[in-house]
Image (cartoon, rainbow, N blue to C red):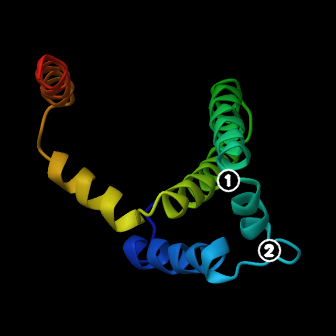
Amino acid sequence: MTATVNTSDALARLAAVIESRLPARGGDAETSYVARLLHKGPDAFLKKIGEEATEVVMAAKDADHGGDRTKIVNEVADLWFHTMVALAHYGFSPAEVIAELERREGTSGIEEKALRKAQAREASND
């Protein structure tokens, strides 16, 4: 199944809504779930990311045993959403994540991991 919507546009629209809920932009914790999460601080939305990641794993495991496969998409949507809340809090956008994925395109995952380890070693030796 292939999505017909422009993914970048959909993420950008959602990111704009999330960013509008930032406390610095007047997000109202009384009327907005996102503003409430952001108002509570990182512990609240980071906890939700952990919960949603676990739910993705559980949905996938269930699907492997005859469960409803569409629950995987629903749980990943929840995970992405809460991750986007974290991105907004830390001043990042989905476009920056997409740019990083594009930068990695065509690079072996094994090579990418080895490069990051080498860079970490260099940084710790400085």
Which residue bears the numbered disc 2? Answer: 32
Q: Quadrant of the C terminus?
A: top left
Residues 119 and 24: in front is: 24
| Residue 119 horizontal/vertical position (percent) | 14, 27
Label 1 with label 2: CB-CB less than 8 Å: no
At horizontal 52% and vertical 64% (from top left) the residue drawn is 88
The x, y position of residue 94, in whole percent, is 41, 64
The answer to whether residue 126 is above or below residue 15 is above
Residue 74, numbered label? 1
Secondary structure beneath disc 1?
Answer: helix
Residue 56 placement, left or right of 36: left
Q: Measured from the top left, where is residue 121 in percent x and y?
A: 16, 18
Label 1 is placed on what type of residue?
Asn
Q: Residue furthest right?
A: 30
Task: Give the left or right position of residue 68, taking residue 24 as reference.
Answer: right
- Which residue of the protein is positioned furthest toward the front in this rendering? 126
Mark 1–mark 2 Cα distance, whole angstroms, equals: 21 Å
Q: Amino acid at mark 2?
A: Ser
Report the number of numbered marks.
2
For the point 11% across and 44% down, which residue is it? 106
Residue at horizontal 62%, vertical 37%?
53
Residue 50 occupies which quadrant of the picture?
top right
Q: Which of marks 2 and 1 precedes in the sequence?
A: 2
| Residue 123 relative to residue 72: left or right | left
